[in-house]
Image: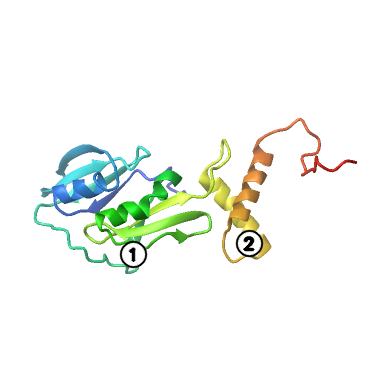
Amino acid sequence: MKKLQVQGVHHITLTGADRQTSLDFWEGVLGMPFIFDQPNLDNPDEGHLYFDPGDGRLITIFTNEKRQATHKTTPADPGCVHHLAFNVSRATFSQCADRLDARGITHSGIKDRGFMDSIYFREPLGLLIELACYRFEPPMGCTHADVMIEAHRIRTAAGDYNIAEVHLADAIERLVTRRQQSLSDDRSPKDPYVKG
């Protein structure tokens, strides 16, 4: 028996409202360029809109002119999608609450997640959307996931309840030490301000 090894998200497809509501939200609110358009090949009564969320992957939306925005909450039963999270820069994140307020979009306010900050609101059919901003940049040659797993190891070894910035900083230091060679024999912390 062998695994079916995945290498990233190819696309996520959502059932959207009508075409214009879908365009207005995904491109007009979230800024995702509208890059491809064709019928839903499995249902001729629906359109299929494609958007780039910023990383070249795809978010696609099935549209139907009979579906209107309901502003209800989507189900959160087991097996249902709870929310979708999109990465934003620190500069954009600092503007999120004000920009949502300016549109009259109800939101959660800023949530501290230890390794990132988040804000939540609903799209026109009630799906919960999260805009998230990491509190760290991974070292060269590493991913956010590399830092997260190392920070998790540090956090659990310390017996801490949740991840904090100290775990991230220590994880980054460990990854740099592991991945980047040095001509120094001793790479331990030093105090150059103390005279010996």
Q: Position of residue 20 (x, y in %)?
A: 14, 47
Residue 56 or residue 137, whichever sits in front = 137
Indicate the position of residue 99 as horizontal and vertical percent values. Answer: 32, 51
- Where on the picture, by quarter, is residue 185? top right
Image side of residue 109 versus residue 16, left or right: right
**Left or right, 188 with reference to 60:** right
Which circle's residue, 2 or 1, is located before the other in the chain? Answer: 1
Task: Name the residue rendered at 32%, 67% in the picture.
Answer: 76
Up the image or down, 86 lies above or below 56; here it is below
Q: Nearer the viewer, residue 137 or 16?
A: 137
Mark nearer the viewer, 2 or 1: 2
Query: Residue 92: image x %, image y %?
Result: 39, 46
Q: Can you name the residue that lies furthest to the top here?
A: 183
Picture layout, residue 144 above or below residue 104? above
As drawn, the residue found furthest toward the bottom would be 77
> Residue at the spot x=29%, y=47% of the render?
30
Q: Looking at the image, can residue 85 be seen?
A: no
Q: Residue furthest right?
A: 196
The secondary structure type at the circle numbered 1 is loop
Q: CA distance from mark 2 to mark 1?
A: 29 Å
Horizontal side of residue 148 vs 122, given as left or right: right
> Residue 7 lies in what quarter of the image?
top left
Residue 79 circle label: 1
Few, some or many residues within 10 Å of mark 1 (<14, 14–19, 20+): few
Q: Is residue 92 left or right of residue 127?
A: right
Q: Amino acid at mark 1?
A: Gly
Residues tagged 2 and 1 counted as in contact (Cβ below 8 A): no
Query: In x, y percent, where is residue 66?
Result: 9, 56
Q: On residue 156, which mark appears? A: 2
The kind of residue tagged 2 is Thr
Q: Residue at x 67, y 61 (%)?
A: 157
| Residue lying at 57% horizontally and 59% vertically, measured from the top left | 163
